[in-house]
Image (cartoon, rainbow, N blue to C red):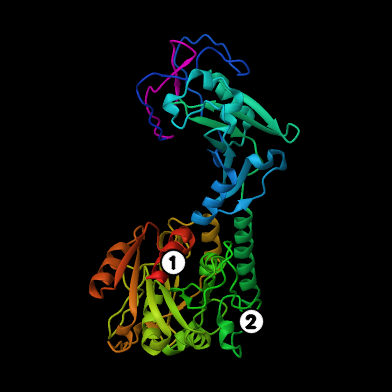
Amino acid sequence: MLYLSNSTRHYLYGKGVSENCGVILSQRRTKVCGPSPAGWNIVPRAVTQDIMVGPFSGVILHHIARETENVQETAQFYKDIFGFQPVETPKEFGDSVVWVELPPSHALHIIKRKPDSRLPESPFTCTDDARREESALQTGHHLSFRVSDYDAAIRLLKEKSIPYFEKTQQEGTIKQAFFFDPDGNGLEIGNWPTSVVSIANLKRTFRCTFNFLSYLCVCGRSSRGRKPLQDGLMADNIDRVQLKSTSGKEAKDELTFLLIHGSMHGAWCWYKVVTILQERGYNVTAVDMTSLGKDKTSPDSVATMSQYTEPAIQCIANVTGKVIIVGHSSGGSAISYIMEQCTEKIEKAIFLAASMPLSGAQRPLWEPCREIGDRVFFTYGNGPEAPPTSAAVNLKYAPTVYYNECPKEDITLALSLLLPHPLQPLRESLSLTPERYGRIRRFYIKATKEGLDGQERQQKVVESNPPERVFEIDSDHSPFFSKPEILISILEEIYRL
């Protein structure tokens, strides 16, 4: 929390740190401003004691501004090096300002530096004269934040006796206030209707939504009699999309990412990853394994790993070139079997928080036992004396087991689509030979925030069957929801290896 000193209304002190805001202020005195400059709103107030006023409400990052000598050259640099795409810039700024996307949903404003501007690169040397220049701060280095209640924010600035100046845009509907932090860093708040979202990100959002809605449109149909490729995500409504990325690259022809979901999930869980990889120019397909997603086969009738993995094997047969196969969770067992069967077509295998079995007998993660309790419901398709044939997670435990760091909307989506998983294929003894399975380069991605005993289980998997390289992602069990951009950066790195 920020405190206003009782010694003078023109000085700000760091008296301590609020556990809520997590901001630490230095103990030294820092001059916020000199004598009240013209054009700045100063509220004279006799302060007789330290006061505390609540923080701004609804604060989110809006944009970051940077000065430059050459706007176009700098914008081109960020486009070429980082892939930041230009977004629509208000015409009133002319050629002196270019806005580019700042993923995931913000903007970088590249502004032509004014030759006579006295705002230096370092805020610690900012002079009082520079602080009094209204035009200097709004076109110089500053961080900008959208606030949900602009008037309340202005009242807080007045309450703190923090000097500021205001400007408006769009006939007064957009209000902005500029001020400095104690160290002289420029700050801006405004009542923009929403955070700036780039055209590229709007397209990405639309594609994610369209892909998922397309998937839902075919969930009610039987998968029997389809062409093999139609088991791929959204294949009934659109081809296995090979779109140009936002950077203009053509789809890469060398390799195809083939994404295999884990227990109880479907191709739908990869919707973010599919969309972004396609946008970046990669070939990518996600498939529903037998009895899951839009496949209507009864899970209790799936008796073998061959039957369970048939959609993926058929998809591989129809892919031009080789694939990088990615298996999540129990999908690790599935892709291990597929590696043995389709060795010549698989370039690399990636195990994402997954099982990575050795040759021999397997044991499903879920079997009736005291530790499982009511977290999983079992179905005994072969009679009560035989082992269970399928398992379904108790939905009240799913957020803790699978999605402890995922966005709420993705959790809601997943809970509506999880299905019982066939257990018989997971008990099958696998024959994984050095000549076939062993020829394929394997990589493992550990999810370091997986709930329950997930971290220990992943470590045991890696130690018992060491891959070529282990990556880590700071996520729960479902990084395709919680950390898709980071997951994709790892997939891209493995693609290049």
Can residue 288 be seen here? The reply is yes
215, 384: nearer the viewer: 215
* Quadrant of the image containing the C terminus: bottom left
Describe residue 18's horizontal placement relative to residue 158 as left or right. left
**Where does the magenta region start and end?**
1-21
413, 352: nearer the viewer: 352
Which x, y percent locates residue 453?
31, 63
Describe residue 420's horizontal placement relative to residue 94 as left or right. left
- For the point 64% across and 66% down, the residue is 210
- Name the residue carrying label 1: 492
Which x, y percent locates residue 363?
31, 79
Residue extending furthest toward the right: 171
Residue type beneath disc 2: Arg
Q: CA distance from mark 2 to mark 1?
A: 34 Å
Characterize the local packing of mark 1: few (<14), some (14-19) or many (20 or more) Cα atoms within 10 angstroms: some
Main secondary structure found in the magenta portion: loop
Q: Is residue 467 covered in magenta?
A: no
- Name the residue carrying label 2: 221
- For the point 29% across and 73% down, the residue is 467
> Is 450 situated above or below 224?
above
Q: Secondary structure at mark 2?
A: loop
- For the point 54% across and 54% down, the residue is 79
